[in-house]
Amino acid sequence: MYAVFRRELFSFLSSMVAYITIGIFLLVSGLLLWFFPDTSILDYGYADLGGFFSLVPYLFMFLIPAITMRSFAEERREGTYELLITRPITIWQIIIAKYLASLVLILFSLIPTLIYAYSLSKLGFPEGNVDSGAIIGSYIGLFLLGATFTSIGLFSSALTKNQVVAFVICAALCAFAFLGFDYSSQLISLQNIEGFIANLGINQHYNSISRGVLDTRDLIYFITVSCLFLFFTNLVIGGKR
Amino acid sequence: MSILVKNLSKHYHKQKAVDAISFEAKPGRILGFLGPNGAGKSTTMRMLTGYLEPTSGHAEIAGRNILTEAIEAKKHIGYLPENTPLYTDMYIREFLNFVGQTYEMKNLAHRIDDVIKMVGLTPEQHKKIGMLSKGYRQRVGLAQAIIHNPDVLILDEPTSGLDPNQLVEIRALIKALGKNKTVIISTHIMQEVEAICDDIIIINKGMIVANDSLEGIKNSNNNSSLEAIFRKLTA
């Protein structure tokens, strides 16, 4: 399993995929956070990273499908999938290895943004006057959100041989999981179960963690959804034999 | 018995790609798997290597059931898939190292040196796989199949697309490997069968139409050429 994980990670790093996606992510988040007047912290006047944390999920909706779309789709198209599956490793080991490799890449893209948090604490008045609990919570939330999107990405990539199709399916599923439940809970006919439906969506749980309170229910939610999609991935891959 | 297949079938909806075939393959002999395109050669090989799941039937590799002891069985197989899929973004050594790691091999660097020498990759060994010509890719494919020194080699059209010089070299290599391993190769080239195979199975529309040694099959068909026998049985 370690061998597959290593190969996967090295193929991200030796191709341009990793650098382009991480580069674009950092560029866009940096511009929106520090430069563009409408969203910039400097114009806003408060030492608060809330804007960044509400923006990143939308960037992840495009960044993560771009990372995960190759994982199974490309291997199946190139036929190297046959090479992989005939090794003495189980399908689960392959899925977990690919999952972890993508997750490490997402971690790589999040780590440089810690500079934003550091700069912000320097900007606070008096220095260091920021809500560090909310920032730590939000980073944990972002990571969990990334992990969930990644499992959705692997599932989408397992569905098709076409990377573009995998990208679109993943972006759509992520957007729906993040916002869809929130919006559909607003429908009039569903108003008596509004809370329940909103609770199925990622947004609700992400916001809850972002407040700096790590509730086990939110944690369990993210882990359950990730496992569920990894399980679906296994079903799809296994079913194609 | 290194490979034992009993009533193995693969059905796609109503189409029977492989229909209850049974055969055996013995160590130290090279088994040629012949048949027209679409006869079910690759499907059978893919079932043996665990890529496809059989609809029904039973198969053993080196005494391990391919369904219930899949991981153990796979450790004893070296497999070269049709069209030789490879990770073209990797260097040859990097790729062989990856393959070796999946078998949890020790002394891997040493073994990679040996294998590269064995398949004649030495002049190209520092290149990326994507930069190699077809013949050398085929050698990388063979190298990854034999790196863990498996008891059973399953090679799906190992010589397709090679020039005559490469053909001779690769055949000699397969012949040498076949001395102490069980080898199954599929091919369309009848001269190749006569050059390297000891036993022959001809498969047509998912069913075995001939299963004998090379001499045996010729004797029972009035010593006509293999090509004539093939055409008679599969036309």
Image (cartoon, coloured by chain):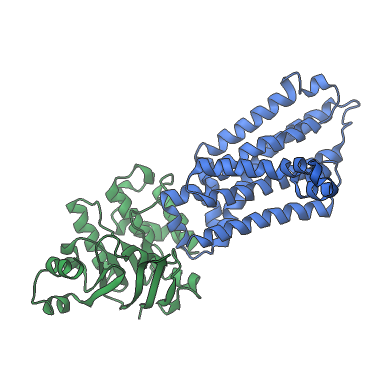
Where residue A226 sits: x, y (%)? 68, 53
Q: Residue at x 62, y 38 (%)?
A: A63
Q: Is residue A223 left or right of residue B203?
A: right
Say which quadrant the N terminus of chain B sits in: bottom left
Q: Considering depth in this image, is B118 or B225 the residue closer to the camera?
A: B225
Give the farthest residue toward the right.
A126
Foreground pick, A81 / A236:
A236
Rendered-image quadrant of the C terminus of chain B = bottom left
Instruction: Specify whether B44 is left or right of A168.
Output: left
| Rendering coords of residue B190 (x, y %) | 17, 64
Above or below, A238 against A151 in this view is: below
Colour displayed for chain A in the image of the structure: blue
Task: Name which quarter of the figure residue B218 lies in.
Answer: bottom left
Q: Residue B106 in the image: x percent, y percent?
A: 48, 64
User: Where is A223 relative to A166, above or below?
Assistant: below
Q: Position of residue B107 (x, y in %)?
A: 45, 62
The residue lying at 66 percent from left, 35 percent from top is A59
- A41 and B54: which is toward the camera: B54
Q: Work out whether residue A213 can be spotted.
A: yes
Residue A44 vs A15, above or below: the answer is: above
Q: Quadrant of residue B228?
A: bottom left
Output the letter for the chain in green: B
In the image, B175 versus A44, the foreground residue is A44
In the image, B97: left or right of B22?
right
Q: Please indicate whether residue B164 sits to the left or right of residue A179 in the image.
A: left
